[in-house]
Image (spheres, grey):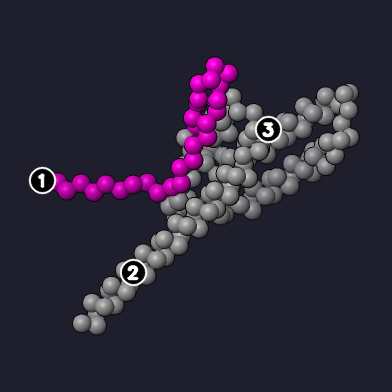
Amino acid sequence: MTKVFKVEQSGIPVDIESIQPDSTIETVHLLLRTDETSLLELAGKAKGVQQEIENLAKDYPILNKNIADFDDESIKDYSELFNVLGQSLKINYDNLFGEGTYDKLRAANLSRIQLFSILPDVNEYLTDELKKRSMQEEKRAKQKMDKYLKKAHR
């Protein structure tokens, strides 16, 4: 008989719900992988992501323009602004949850403005969860160490 070991994938699940025009709800299931390789990759990408966003700001001076300076004739400016916003969001969502995430979210009829408005909340939730899990893991490791030390002193 074979012994089966079940190992759960480590990650922080995030569901983003999009209420459709017909009142149905489309849920996009995301997972921030929290295995050591994924976390190291994410940390390594952080500077690159920041650089990509800074490059967008340099390449598109529209980002430095005050929205109050836009007028009815500035529809081209709005279009450019939304395109750059989409590029920025793609960089962020795809780096957090994997390639294609931004496209899945857009396919669920989520607008760039909606995705932009929830991104800080998503980031805050992920940061809080990572801290909480880190503290739990540290506590668990300490308990195991204490248990082994007690056995060693017997």
**Quadrant position of residue 66:** top right
Q: Nearer the viewer, mark 2 or mark 1?
A: 2
Query: Against 112, is 149 above or below?
Result: below
The amino acid marked with disc number 3 is: Ile
Query: Against 13, is 152 above or below?
Result: below
The amino acid marked with disc number 1 is: Met
Residue with the mark numbered 2: 143
Residue with the mark numbered 1: 1
Neighbor class of circle 3 (other Cα within 10 Å; few <14, some 14-19, many 20+) is few
Q: Nearer the viewer, mark 1 or mark 3?
A: 3
**Are circles 2 and 1 on residues that touch, CB within 8 Å?**
no
Q: Earlier in the sequence, mark 3 or mark 2?
A: 3
**In terms of secondary structure, where does tag 2 sit?**
helix
Neighbor class of circle 1 (other Cα within 10 Å; few <14, some 14-19, many 20+) is few
Quadrant in which the N terminus is drawn? top left
**Are circles 1 and 3 on residues that touch, CB within 8 Å?**
no
Q: State how far apart marks 3 and 2 are (Cα).
A: 46 Å
Residue with the mark numbered 3: 113
Q: Is residue 97 left or right of residue 110?
A: left
Mark yes or no: residue 93 visible. yes
Residue 142 image position (x, y, % from top left): 37, 70
**Quadrant position of residue 65:** top right
**In terms of secondary structure, where does tag 3 sit?**
helix
Residue 109 image position (x, y, % from top left): 59, 24
Q: Is residue 52 magenta?
A: no
Q: Earlier in the sequence, mark 2 or mark 1?
A: 1
